[in-house]
Amino acid sequence: MYTQLEQRGMLQPPVNVATLRKMKADGEPIACLTAYDASYAVLVDAAGADLVLVGDSLGMVIQGHDTTVPVTVDDIIYHSKAVARGLRRPFLVADMPFMSYTEPGQALDNAVRLMQEGGAMMIKLEGGDGQLEIVEHLARHDIPVCAHIGLKPQSVHKIGGFRVQGREPEKAKAMIESAKRLQDAGADIVLLECIPNEAGEAITSALDVPVIGIGAGPHVDGQILVLYDVLDITQGRTPRFVQNFQKEHTSPLDALAAYVKAVKDRSYPAPEHCFS
Ligand code: KIV
């Protein structure tokens, strides 16, 4: 029974939390991407990504909203189901959308839906100390959790824009302490968005669990980017940490494979993608 997944004719076994922890221990960078449908999920898998996130960024890149705030649990489930059908090897994480985890019971109900209906293997939620009780409650029920700190796009209206977080030494220190508390509460991955390199490095060395960065510098355990940014589908001004991998490739698969290779050989992110 336990070997079923590995018998599906795969060259490599599926990635799980233990694989990700081992990659951190071995110093092997974890290559992550978002995906929102089955066709791209197949490409992201073929390109060699280790982890795929059905992010609430779908509110912006798929639904055309200005923020991720309008995204619902049903939206994430719809896209996660499609992505799950396209994936074989990567670890599938799904986002808990805005206000879907305000209380432990509500968070557990929604996390269960993302896993049972959406096929997710882990859920991601935005939050620091305010979400410790939620993370603890989910972890107590064996729900794998990724805690997203730094820039939290669901808080955009509270912050007043998509801005780099933790530039001030006392704020960076508070973020490091908060990351440790999230790990102690049971988070299996910590994701850092838009913070200075130094904070990314300090958090990565302080934690035992894998730390994935987006605009968090080169000294983290893995990198993630929004698929449509990597493929240059996103129009207008993209954040500093984005690299267009489609520019030098003719097919989307080649561009995605180039991204994975650049994460693995640490040529991405380069200094021009970082905040310090
Ligand atoms: O929603 C999303 O795609 C994300 C990534 C930017 C990490 O949270």
Image (cartoon, helix red, strand yellow):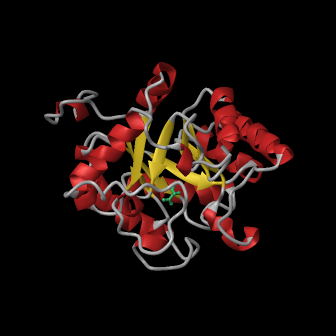
Give the residue at the far top of this rendering: 26
In x, y percent, where is residue 126? 63, 55
In x, y percent, where is residue 132? 72, 46
Q: Is residue 264 above or below residue 71?
A: above
Is residue 86 visible to the viewer in this orientation of the structure? no
In x, y percent, where is residue 192? 61, 47
Quadrant location, the N terminus: top left
Give 89 or 140, whichever is nearer the viewer: 89
Is residue 248 visible to the viewer in this orientation of the structure? yes
Give 142 or 230, whichever is nearer the viewer: 230
In x, y percent, where is residue 86? 24, 53
92 left or right of 181 in image: left
Quadrant location, the C terminus: top right
Q: Residue at x 42, y 74 (%)?
A: 235
Give 250 or 141, whichever is nearer the viewer: 250
Q: Residue at x 23, y 50 (%)?
A: 254
45 left or right of 123 in image: left
Give 248 or 148, whichever is nearer the viewer: 248
